[in-house]
Structure formats: structure tokens, C-alpha cells
Image (cartoon, rainbow, N blue to C red):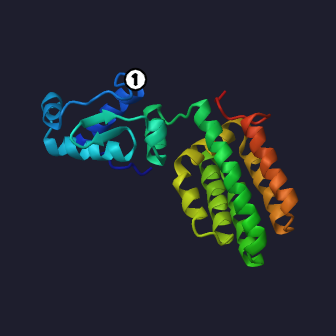
């Protein structure tokens, strides 16, 4: 067995985690002003460089807003946030996602998959589609939920690539962390075989270039995950 190197978080990471926790818990409500950097540094016994760097990262995540000549305020991260915000929320919740976040991710994924499958049918070569079949074989051979989730993500990312849209693969990759989390949960609830069957059926319609059937299947299995028989909001 090979053990991984342990490393302690930096002071900046700890500063960011503490502010994120205060904001996400509601102890620092939206719109609340933060103390000046010098005062924050004194209270938390860190350098101003740590505070400055941490605040810049929190602003990039949408948690705070720096208003020129006014100060720094807690932002409405639901309006100002991005994917980094979602990942921070997951980490705060121990890797978990709430029901609203899961539903929203699945709804976005449905729109993205419609574009991915229709683009692949229109533009992918037979050789490119055959390569997708190799990835399904990796999925079928997966021994753990995480291995299966990684293979399923690779399939979806490759599907986005073969359709020829240069932006779609980047969007897919930006969602990798939360999507992997949801597929791992799906496998624990319903088995790797269920994930494999869903993907194989999608692949069958792709290979026959049946746009109506493949888009209907995307709607079917994602609707099952959102409202139907294979929901993934809670683990049993």
C-alpha cells in the first residue's frame, strides 16, 4: 500500500475556510460589512498579506464584494458566485450537495447533453463514435463507484469533444467535481450496472444517429434522476 504525503493547509486557506464558514452558516449575513484588512489581520493574528490574498480569492468566488471607497461587504453568492462557489459549498457541507443544487445541476446537464448528442450525431466520425465504445468498456469494467463515475465523466467529456463545439468540453470539464460526486452517489444507490446500462443505451442511439431517440433517452434518464425512480437527492 502506498501512502500519500500529508500537508497542512496554509494560513490563507484557513482564513478563507473560516470566512466561508461564517458566510455559509449565516453568521455573516449578506450585506454585512467586514472590518478593514488591518483589523482582520490583528483579530485573526495573521499578516495583512494573508488577509489581502484571502479576500481576493473570496471575491473571486462571489462571497464578498469590494466597493471602492466604501469597504468590503458580504455578497449574495447566489448572484455573484461561479463554479468555485459551488465547490466551496460542497466542501463546507462535507462534499454534499443540497436538493436544490442537485436539481439545478441535473437540469443544466440535460440542456448540455441535448447539445452534445445532437452535435455528435451531426459531426462526429464513425471512428470517434467507436472510441466512445472503448470508454463504455472501461465503465463496464469499473470495480468501484468512483472508477465508474470517472469513466462516465470521460465518456460525456469525449462526447462533447467529438461534436466539434469548442466551448462545450470546457463547460463540461468545469462541472467535473460536482458531477463526479453525483455519479458516485448514483452508483451507490442503484449500482454501477445501472449507470452502465443508461450510458450503453445512449451510445446505441448515437451509433445509429437517431437524433429523436437519443434526445428522448437523455430526457428520460435525467427526468428519472430529477423526479422519477432513480433520484439521487439522498443516500440510503
Placement of 198 over or under 118, stated as above or below = above
Q: Which residue is mark 1?
A: 26
In the image, residue 18 lies at what x, y percent? 31, 31
Placement of 135 over or under 97, stated as above or below = below
Residue shown at 45% from the left, 50% from the top: 1
173 or 145: nearer the eye?
A: 173
In the image, residue 85 lies at what x, y percent? 44, 42
Would residue 141 be visible to someone looking at this image? no
Q: Secondary structure at mark 1?
A: loop
Residue shown at 78% from the left, 39% from the top: 224
Would residue 102 be visible to someone looking at this image? yes
Q: Quadrant of residue 159?
A: bottom right
On the picture, is 169 further left or further right than 25? right
Placement of 184 over or under 20, stated as above or below = below
On the picture, is 193 further left or further right than 236? right
Q: Quadrant of residue 187?
A: top right
Residue shown at 66% from the left, 49% from the top: 109
Q: Quadrant of the C terminus?
A: top right
Q: What residue occupies the far front of the structure in this picture?
A: 69
Amino acid at each position: 500500500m502506498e501512502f500519500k504525503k500529508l500537508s497542512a493547509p496554509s494560513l490563507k486557506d484557513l482564513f478563507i475556510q473560516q470566512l466561508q464558514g461564517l458566510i455559509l452558516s449565516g453568521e455573516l449575513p449578506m450585506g454585512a460589512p467586514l472590518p478593514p484588512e488591518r483589523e482582520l489581520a490583528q483579530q485573526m493574528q495573521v499578516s495583512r498579506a494573508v488577509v489581502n490574498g484571502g479576500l481576493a480569492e473570496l471575491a473571486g468566488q462571489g462571497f464578498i464584494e469590494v466597493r471602492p471607497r466604501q469597504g468590503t461587504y458580504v455578497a449574495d453568492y447566489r448572484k455573484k458566485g461561479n463554479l468555485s462557489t459551488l465547490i466551496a459549498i460542497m466542501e463546507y457541507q462535507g462534499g454534499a450537495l443540497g436538493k436544490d443544487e442537485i436539481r439545478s445541476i441535473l437540469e443544466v446537464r440535460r440542456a448540455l447533453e441535448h447539445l452534445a448528442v445532437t452535435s455528435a450525431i451531426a459531426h462526429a466520425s464513425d471512428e470517434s463514435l467507436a472510441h466512445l465504445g472503448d470508454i463504455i468498456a472501461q465503465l463496464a469494467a469499473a470495480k468501484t463507484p468512483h472508477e465508474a463515475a470517472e469513466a462516465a465523466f470521460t465518456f460525456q467529456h469525449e462526447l462533447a469533444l467529438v461534436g466539434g463545439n469548442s466551448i462545450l468540453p470546457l463547460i463540461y470539464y468545469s462541472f467535473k467535481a460536482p458531477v463526479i460526486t453525483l455519479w458516485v452517489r448514483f452508483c451507490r444507490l442503484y449500482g454501477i450496472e445501472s449507470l452502465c446500462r443508461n450510458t450503453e443505451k445512449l451510445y446505441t442511439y448515437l451509433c445509429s444517429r437517431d437524433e429523436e431517440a437519443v434526445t428522448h433517452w437523455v430526457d428520460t434518464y435525467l427526468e428519472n434522476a430529477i423526479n422519477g425512480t432513480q433520484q439521487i437527492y439522498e443516500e440510503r
